[in-house]
Image (cartoon, rainbow, N blue to C red):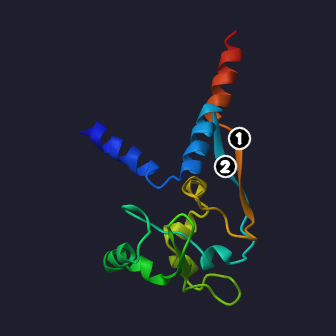
Amino acid sequence: MKSIVKSKKIISFFTDFTLAGLIQFIFLKIRRKVLVVRGSCNCCGNCCRAINLEGPKGWIKSEQYFQELLMKNHEFSRFSVVKKDQSGHLVFECKKLGENNMCTDYDQRPDVCRLFPDKRLTFCGGGLPDGCGYRFEEMKSFKHVLDNKLKHNSK
């Protein structure tokens, strides 16, 4: 049973990857690298004006799915649909963004805001908004660095 659950998680992890994102993911693995988030928030508010959202079934691509999520989870009511991006994902804006580019409900913000930016954005065709103070960088994985260190110390 555990293997079925694990298989479903793996499949759902890849379902929203674009072809370019899947290739990038594979090349990172081959080169034993990972994406890391660097930088810091510069309070531009652009992430609040154009954000992709995810539900239990993956990234939100249809208004029907968004409406289903609204019925089940009030957290989504703070967002409204702006457009659809080139990857087919709905783009949302947050209704809680103040004129000063600060969240007017910061203590109650959802996980999507608390955890921004999500590295998976790059694999599904998304990216960081213009003017964002964050960036994604490739670096050797900790496991790769540790394995090399242990290998050299054992000689």
Residue 44, x across and y down, in percent: 73, 77
Few, some or many residues within 10 Å of mark 2 (<14, 14–19, 20+) = some
Q: Which amino acid does label 2 sit on?
A: Val
Q: Is residue 24 above or below residue 64?
A: above
Q: Determine the secondary structure under disc 2.
A: strand
- Considering every residue shown, the one lying at the far bottom of the view is 99
Residue 39, x across and y down, in percent: 75, 59
Residue 12, x across and y down, in percent: 40, 51
Q: In this view, does 131 lie above or below 96?
A: above
Residue 100, x across and y down, in percent: 71, 87
Tell me the quarter of the image containing the N terminus.
Answer: top left
Give the quarter of the image for residue 2.
Answer: top left
Q: Name the residue that disc number 1 marks.
A: 139
Asked if the residue at tag 2 contacts the one at tag 1, i.e. Cβ–Cβ closer than 8 Å, the answer is yes
Q: Name the residue that disc number 2 marks.
A: 36
Gap between marks 1 and 2, in whole Å?
A: 7 Å
Q: Determine the secondary structure under disc 1.
A: strand
Disc with the residue nearer the chain's start (1 vs 2): 2
